[in-house]
Image (spheres, grey):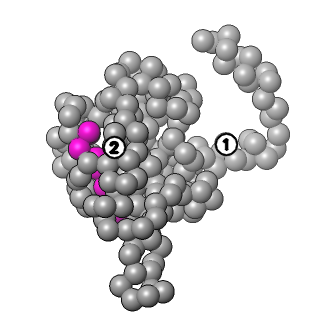
Amino acid sequence: MIASLILTALRTPITASSLHQRAIRNKMSTHHKQRIFDLLKNNAIKYKAMHHEETPTSEDSARARGEDLSTGGKALVLKFREVAQVEGDSAAEFAIFVLSASRKLHTKAIKKELKIKNVRFATGEELSNLTDGLVPGSVPPFGRPIIDLDLFVDTSIEQNEKIAFNCGSLTDSIVMSVADYMKAAAPTKVFSFSK
């Protein structure tokens, strides 16, 4: 593992721009992480925090945490259009959708439940703008007050006793009970949108 990280580091050119981007990401991740820690502390919630190697995929995260893949909470920022009330009058919206990392997103279920026509992933630029600089894979499974978006949670999350998730970076995770997560996260709605 260490040899692999060293080889990757040797093959990745370090430029002033890449160092600047890394510094910005670290600052943003610290901001989100601290806000999550504060939320959990204010709600007297116990959790386990851990720092690990960069984990760009859910599978990598599960391995680094020593947790089953199904325990992972995958947070996706999606863009959707509400069904127009009046012809030509529809507003684009974004929201966070959280499902078990072992499951796949089922957009038809989202469209049916929310009575919407179109659903798509936020682009990297949209994601960054909506989340104060987060990158795919680092989004924590929290809406307001951590990220100013509605939060929808899939029923697959409730099938486990605990949830594990990246908390604003690809190198920091939290593991906590699902009951405490649901209390702290206060989702807008819980319904089935995975398969």
- Residue on which the image places disc 1: 22
Amino acid type, callout 2 = Ser
Q: Quadrant of residue 102?
A: top left
Q: Is residue 129 at least partly visible in the picture?
A: yes
**Left or right side of 86 for 127:** right
Q: Residue 46 at what x, y percent from top left?
A: 22, 35
Mark 2, mark 1: which one is toward the viewer? Answer: 2
How packed mark 1 is, by other alpha carbons closer than 10 Å (few <14, some 14-19, many 20 or more), is: few
How packed mark 2 is, by other alpha carbons closer than 10 Å (few <14, some 14-19, many 20 or more), is: some
**Left or right side of 76 for 16:** right
**Tag 2's secondary structure?**
loop
Front-lying residue, 128 or 115 = 115
Q: Earlier in the sequence, mark 2 or mark 1?
A: 1
Q: Residue 82 at what x, y percent from top left?
A: 39, 73
Residue occupying image coordinates x 56% and y 33%: 56
Residues rendered magenta in the picture? 150-157
Q: Main secondary structure of the magenta part?
A: strand
- Residue on which the image places disc 2: 194
Amino acid type, callout 1 = Arg
Residue occupying image coordinates x 31% and y 65%: 114
On-image quarter of the C terminus = top left
